[in-house]
Image (cartoon, grey):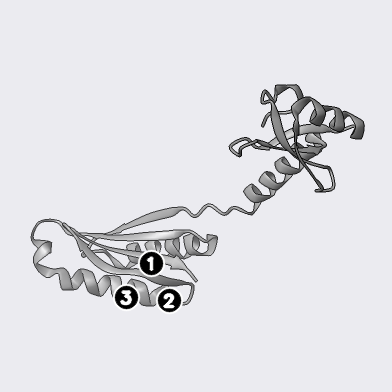
């Protein structure tokens, strides 16, 4: 934003500090009015013809903008996508360990990409993999919901789970 003497056009459309319209005036006249109010002349719409300028306290305006941006960043929530890899021949203890990891991630609010990888001749028995993913979905149904069902991607089945 251009302020005060950095405004290099001949005429501007002037808006007062309370929002009252002064119309199209010379830039020097607009600067004199801003000095009379003890405020700054700020170019708010440089693309307009003639450019629109407002009489305001520029430092207070910048401070308010920074506060709004900081509040917006504070409210922003970053969602991480965690990946859990399984195999069709997973043991019961390994399955329970993976299940506890997924439950912890879901309680934190993360998304989980559950990938079941087939190797070699395991591709011939994809129904075993689907059974494991169905059991997985049933076990986490109290805290998570399936966003994308088990989809086949090459040598793997992929399921996306999100927190409830």
Sequence order check, earlier mark of 2 and 3: 3
Image quadrant in which the N terminus is located: top right
Percent x, y of residue 161? 39, 66
Sequence order check, earlier mark of 1 and 2: 1
Which residue is the site of mark 3? 135
Which residue shows up at 49% across the image and 62% down it?
104
**Which of the 4 image quadrants contains residue 100?**
bottom left
Which residue shows up at 68% across the image and 28% down it?
2
Q: Is residue 46 left or right of residue 125?
A: right
- From this view, report whether residue 138 is shown above or below residue 122: below
- Find numbered disc 3 in the image and state the secondary structure of the residue it sits on: helix
C-alpha gap between disc 2 and disc 3? 10 Å
- Find numbered disc 1 in the image and state the secondary structure of the residue it sits on: helix
Asked if marks 1 and 3 touch (Cβ < 8 Å), the reply is no
C-alpha gap between disc 1 and disc 2? 15 Å
Q: Nearer the viewer, residue 83 or 25?
A: 25
Which residue is the site of mark 2? 141
Which residue shows up at 31% across the image and 68% down it?
92
Q: Is residue 91 left or right of residue 154?
A: right
- From this view, report whether residue 16 is shown above or below residue 29: below
- From this view, report whether residue 51 is shown above or below residue 94: above
**Which of the 4 image quadrants contains residue 64?**
top right
Which residue is the site of mark 1? 96
C-alpha gap between disc 1 and disc 3? 11 Å
Q: Is residue 145 left or right of residue 152?
A: right
The label on residue 85 is none
- From this view, report whether residue 47 is shown above or below residue 110: above
């Amino acid at each position: 934003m251009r302020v005060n003497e950095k405004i290099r056009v001949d005429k501007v459309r002037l808006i007062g500090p309370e929002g009252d319209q002064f119309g199209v005036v010379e830039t020097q006249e607009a600067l004199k009015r801003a000095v009379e109010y003890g405020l700054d002349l700020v170019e708010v719409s440089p693309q307009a013809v003639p450019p629109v300028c407002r009489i305001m306290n520029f430092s207070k305006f910048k401070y308010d903008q920074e506060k709004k941006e900081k509040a917006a960043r504070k409210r922003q929530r970053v969602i991480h996508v965690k990946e859990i890899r399984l195999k069709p021949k997973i043991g019961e203890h390994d399955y329970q360990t993976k299940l506890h990891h997924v439950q912890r991630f879901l309680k934190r609010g993360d998304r989980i990409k559950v990938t079941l990888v087939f190797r070699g001749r395991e591709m011939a028995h994809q129904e075993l993999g689907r059974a494991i993913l169905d059991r997985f979905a049933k076990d986490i149904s109290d805290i998570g919901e399936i966003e994308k069902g088990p989809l086949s991607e090459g040598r793997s089945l992929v399921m996306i789970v999100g927190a409830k």
